[in-house]
Image (tube, rainbow, N blue to C red):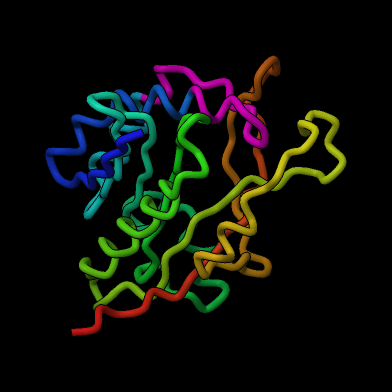
């Protein structure tokens, strides 16, 4: 496969939003999210994301088709409600660059695209600044599921090992929540989300 990875910022982001909505609905149906997505919600979410300061989308193209997308933006421009969680643990939320979703179709996994997604987002974060200077950390969060949840597929391998290779670690006590409707369930319910952090090394010149 001849895969092209392209970072997009500013007005370029608009080009990738329909693919991002489609991929979020398709990929997040899988365990562990079991997300029952709707285009109505996606349009609201994507409008908010696209307006975020210093937002970036990294898209994976197979020919003209977008087969994977990753997003990032400053934490306070994306999800201000998480700021108190970071501040309570003596982490300046102003200095955190938040890596949002990373969604990739199954046939394209295991080919290094996930690493490329992080490479581009972290490089972008290093080249941005906040009100007090450089960003000091990148972060993301992942849903927390019970180890014995009967819905977990046989042979499922979590991404913890991949994330640790990237230099990320779960921050003790740093948990928030997102609400969504699971497949076959009503209504939306809050899901615990564990934050993972990595110090963001400055650019060496």
Residue 88 is drawn in which quadrant?
A: bottom right
Q: Residue drawn at (59%, 49%), measured in percent from left and top? A: 142
In the image, residue 148 sits, relative to residue 74, either above or below, namely above
- Residue sitting at the far top: 184
In the image, residue 93 sits, relative to residue 80, either above or below, namely below
Q: In this view, does 200 lie to the left or right of 134?
A: right
Q: Position of residue 55 (x, y in %)?
A: 26, 50
Name the quarter where the N terminus is drawn.
Answer: top left
* Closer to us: 113 or 20: 113
Q: Residue drawn at (24%, 83%), measured in percent from left and top? A: 204
Residue 203 is drawn in which quadrant?
A: bottom left
* Closer to us: 181 or 196: 196
* Closer to us: 64 or 82: 64
Segment colored magenta: 26-42
Q: Is residue 130 left or right of residue 33?
A: left
Name the quarter where the C terminus is drawn.
Answer: bottom left
In the image, residue 76 sits, relative to residue 20, either above or below, namely below
Q: Residue drawn at (30%, 80%), measured in percent from left and top? A: 202
Q: Residue drawn at (22%, 55%), measured in percent from left and top? A: 54
Q: Is residue 92 left or right of residue 154?
A: left
Q: Where is residue 57 in the image (x, y as percent from the top left)?
A: 28, 44
Q: Where is residue 199 in the image (x, y as percent from the top left)?
A: 45, 75
Q: Does the magenta stretch include residue 37?
A: yes
Q: Main secondary structure of the magenta part?
A: loop
């Amino acid at each position: 496969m001849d895969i092209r990875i392209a970072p997009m910022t500013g007005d370029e982001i608009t080009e990738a939003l329909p693919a991002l909505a489609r991929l979020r609905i398709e990929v997040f149906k899988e365990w562990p999210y079991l997300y029952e997505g709707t285009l109505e919600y996606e349009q609201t979410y994507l409008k908010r994301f696209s307006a975020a300061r210093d937002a970036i989308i990294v898209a994976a193209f197979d020919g003209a088709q977008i087969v994977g997308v990753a997003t990032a933006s400053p934490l306070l421009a994306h999800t201000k409600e998480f700021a108190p969680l970071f501040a309570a643990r003596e982490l300046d939320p102003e200095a955190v660059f938040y890596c949002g979703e990373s969604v990739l179709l199954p046939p394209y996994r295991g080919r290094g695209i996930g690493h490329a997604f992080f490479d581009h987002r972290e490089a972008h974060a290093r080249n941005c600044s906040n009100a007090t200077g450089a960003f000091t950390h990148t972060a993301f969060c992942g849903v927390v599921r019970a180890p014995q949840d009967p819905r977990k597929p046989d042979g499922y391998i979590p991404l913890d090992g991949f994330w640790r290779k990237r230099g990320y670690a779960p921050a003790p006590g740093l948990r928030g929540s997102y609400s969504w409707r699971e497949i076959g369930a009503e209504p939306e319910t809050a899901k615990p989300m564990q934050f993972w952090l990595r110090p963001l090394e400055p650019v060496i010149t």
